[in-house]
Image: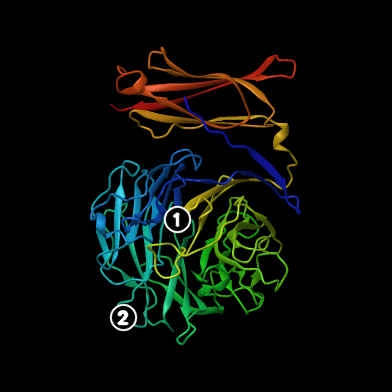
Amino acid sequence: MHYKFFFIFVFLSTLNIHFIRAQSFRIFPSTVTQTEPIVSYNRSNPDLLFASAVTFNTITAFRSEGIYVSTDRGLTWFGSDTCSAPIIINHGGDPGVVVTGTNRLVITHIGSVFFGLYSHYSDDLGSSWTSAYTITGDQIEDKGTTVIDDSPTSPFNNNIYTAYVSFQNAPFKVYFARSTNNGQSWSSPQAINPNPLSRSSGPDLAIFDDGKIIGCWAGMTTTNPIREDFISIAISSDAGNTWIVRENVFDVNGIMGTLASKNNIRVNGLPRIAIDKTSGQFSGRIYIVTNEINNLPAGQDPDIILRYSDDLGNSWSNGVRVNQDAFNNGKIQYLPAITIDETGGINIIYYDDRTTSSDSAEVYLSRSTDGGNTWVDQQISGHKFKPQSIVGGASNYQGDFISIISINRKLYTYWMDNFSGIYQIWSSIIDISPNNIDVDIDEISNFKLFQNYPNPFNPSTKIPFLIAGKNTNKFYATLNIFDLLGRKIATLLNESITSGKYEVEFNTNTIPDLKSGIYFYQITLMEITEDEKMENTFSETGKMILLR
């Protein structure tokens, strides 16, 4: 029997916004370098998360995309640092990921041996993959995006879209392709902006619930130093068949280049886009976040800047400085990612060195609940690290983006750092309590039994459960396995424990004659009071499948 334990703690923001934060953790600890995390889920099954990353084996120089899957909404993960989809030697990283309404996993990636953008899909949670579908054979920029329309009210529900910049012919344009059959095939790519003002870079896509697509990208300077010069957008109401293009909707002064104080790691100021899909005050508002310097409200050091539009991109607000450290204090913020949660809150994560030495960084979250007028900043990584170039990557490469998604008032954050001695994907899950609730988690007890993973399994699986409350609270816990007839097969836990997150392993090698089939796991908890009495009995059951 093996189980792991994590403390849960709470902090109160200065604006009376409550965050309940779990300790940061690596989603797939390994000896392979991982960077550029991208994470997706589908509204039809929010418990299933699919993540990927660029992976390097620094010993063999093998490059691929990680395949990381969670069936308990990001608490635990399984998978591999290598995408096994053929042709296996042609995986060049820069993945895009989506989950379809049928729980199909779809991944796009650039080529390693051959130029191009390729797609594969898996119907068994990443265990096996189809051969590559060639979306394009062009040489492409390594910063594209892949998204799915998962809105049940959209006429294009389950369409998958990808956008990228082709380096085939100058000036470099943004191209777009779609799949209408869950990733089995893709349309021929078409240029979104046939007549760009300058080289395009870093397209990002977002989808309204009525099916409209909006894309944004940076227009680059034409002379050195090359940097992001302006932001352009395009909107389509017919699944990308036609586009309304608006070039240079606002000026920026991006930070593309290197950060001397951080071992000259390569960074960029490419835009990330999000939409408020709530029915609240800012419904339909489009947000674009960039990373800028020497362009007010950005100061003389890199800052995170947000702009928004309330009229489908026809006009844009002035820039808003997101990070709330002192202006022009010499501190550096870089690589932002954005999501809008179910309450309309704006949530942006980024690297930050405001409380570290200049050669180090932490991960911060800035959150606004009033459309970007006021912000609360909070460090979420729980540790600092010293950025450095990744062995096996391009010159000065650390990775070009990080990720954040929102599901049911929880923020799921993902970034890469080398705190463990090697670049790995880290995560922190942040529970956003409503502003008008003033409850300390240490004053309550909460019980949750999660889906076992992997499932189906052979020969072993792990069963996670959570007891939230004071870490001095005591409980008597039993965890039993039953067959379809209700007969007890095994007892995995039968002891006194305290609050925390646990994983209990069920290894069927100890029961060699156990046959394939459906089994049930049941946890029973009884709270132990200060006078050693037992009360508040809680019991929950889950189902799992053994495949011999």
Residue 146 shows up from this direction:
yes
Quadrant housing residue 501: top right
Q: Position of residue 262 (x, y in %)?
A: 55, 67
Q: Give the structural element (helix, strand or loop) at label 1.
A: strand
Q: Residues within 10 Å of mark 2 (few under 14, many from 20)?
A: few
User: Is 188 above or below relative to 513?
Assistant: below
User: Is 365 above or below relative to 300?
Assistant: above
Q: Earlier in the sequence, mark 1 or mark 2?
A: 1
> Badges 1 and 2: C-beta atoms under 8 Å apart?
no
Quadrant housing residue 517: top left
Q: Position of residue 26 (x, y in %)?
A: 50, 46
In the picture, measured across the screen, residue 470 lies left or right of residue 308, that is right
Q: Residue furthest bottom?
A: 223
Q: Position of residue 519 (x, y in %)?
A: 39, 22
Q: Which residue is mark 2?
A: 169
Q: Give the structural element (helix, strand or loop) at label 2.
A: loop
Which amino acid type corresponds to the residue marked 1 in the rendered image? Ile
Which amino acid type corresponds to the residue marked 2 in the rendered image? Asn
Quadrant housing residue 358: bottom right
Between 430 and 406, the residue placed more toward the observer is: 430
Q: Which residue is mark 1?
A: 38
Between 182 and 453, the residue placed more toward the observer is: 453
Q: Position of residue 296 (x, y in %)?
A: 66, 78
Residue 152 shows up from this direction:
no
For the point 39% across and 64% down, the residue is 393
Report the Cα–Cα distance between label 1 and label 2.
28 Å
In the picture, measured across the screen, residue 321 lies left or right of residue 266, that is right
For the point 53% across and 33% down, the residue is 4
For the point 68% across and 26% down, the residue is 473
* Badge count: 2
